[in-house]
Amino acid sequence: MTKEITAVSAEKGLISPLIIIGILFFIFGFVTWLSAVLIPYLQIACELNNFQSYLVAFAFYISYFVMGVPSGWLLKITGFKKGMSIGLLLVAVGSLLFIPAALNRQYTLFLFGLFVQGAGLTVLQTASNPYVTILGPKESAARRISFMGICNGIAGAIAPVILGAVILNDADALKDKLSSLNPTQKIIELNDLASKVILPYAIITFILIVLAAVIYFSTLPELNEEELDEGDEVLEKTTKTSVFQFPHLMIGVLVLFGYTGVEVIAGNSIIGYGAYQGIPLATAKFFTSFTLISMLVGYLVGIVCIPKYFSQETALKSSAVLGILFAVLAILTNGIISVVFVALLGLANSLMWPSIWPLAIAGLGKFTKTGSSLLVMAISGAAVLPLLYGYLADHINAQQAYWMVIPCYLAVGYYAVAGHKVGKKNT
């Protein structure tokens, strides 16, 4: 009876920290998925081709690779809570840079602002993902991360709608108008379009600064992942001297690299792909939200079903199969049907992150923060693979370019079946 009361008390004690972390994941989603609208917006405002416009995703996500290890070092000095506040402030600085970038219509400054935003989110992700994983039983880690995914997904579904309504309003008419203007008139119209991001990003900057203060002064507990991992019998941590001695982690990093790439391709390419299929931008600007809504459905499935009805491994296997199926159908069909299958990739992708992450950091012990840093660095797949998609879209077409996601889903399937077990039996 005493143990039951203790367990209930412990669960209640987790509610407040999880709510705070949930707010952070909302911020992740909101800031991250704004890029889906920024790509077609900057393509018009800065007169870019597909490859150049996907530098938006590259600048944002490459910071995860550059800042992954430094974020781990920072957290060792500051701890989780202060690190989260610093991360929020960095995102605020990146958002603030959008104002001079818009005033001068400087694409390189937009990209630098996106890089700084990504750097801040790298710190936040490095802290919050392991925090959620170890803040409760390992068996239900995917369920907790799925809950965070809902917070992330709701924000991601809202963000493109809000920003799209502001900066892509009458975009189709503007594109037609630009072709008939002289150079001077064209610059005036493009400058006016660029200025539309100033107010939204000023508001975002203010909110981020307030949240940084809230987190700093909150009662969010500091966790010691070494103590929480003492009971892990999967790997003998005492025999390990380096994080690189965990093969299941190294494979997980590579798989996460591919997964994050295809997730961002599904969300960021769908607006342009809708336009490629002949759908007006006035309609297509909402398509990213459909991708995020399908991800939300997957997160709900994860919360209800993991681990009660199926395991994290089973969820990952199913996700890989669905990803391959939806990608092939998107390539073989046309029009709105094809776009729907691209949106459904969100459903296939939804349980990949919450399943890969806990499988990859299982048994790392004192290497948990470093392992988390490596996994966060793998988010740079979202920088590289969308850029490759943009190149293929320019040189082949936007539909056939989706063939590139198939090998990534095959890698996820391998990790679900065997990859996460490598190195565990004989250590």
Image (cartoon, rainbow, N blue to C red):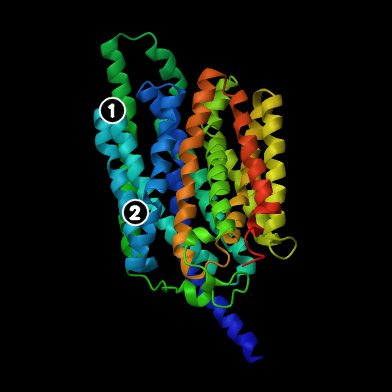
Which quadrant does the C terminus fall into?
A: bottom right
* Kind of residue at badge 2: Leu
Relative to the observer, which residue lies in front, 179 or 35? Answer: 35
Which quadrant does the N terminus fall into?
A: bottom right
Label 1, secondary structure: give it.
loop
Quadrant in the picture for residue 164? top left
Position of residue 135 relative to residue 297, above or below, is: below
Q: Which mark is residue 71?
A: none
Give the residue displayed 46% in from the left and 24% down from the top: 50
Residue 346 x %, y %: 61, 42
Earlier-in-chain disc, 1 versus 2: 1
Relative to the observer, which residue lies in front, 372 or 307? Answer: 372
Relative to the observer, which residue lies in front, 203 or 347? Answer: 347
* Kind of residue at badge 1: Arg
Provide the residue designation for mark 1: 105
Label 2, secondary structure: give it.
helix
Q: Is residue 50 left or right of residue 306?
A: left
Residue 423 x %, y %: 62, 61
Position of residue 136 relative to residue 212, above or below, is: below
Between the residue at mark 1 and the residue at mark 2, the CA separation in whole angstroms equals 24 Å
Spot the residue most to the bottom.
2
Q: Which mark is residue 208?
A: 2
Residue 309 x %, y %: 75, 62
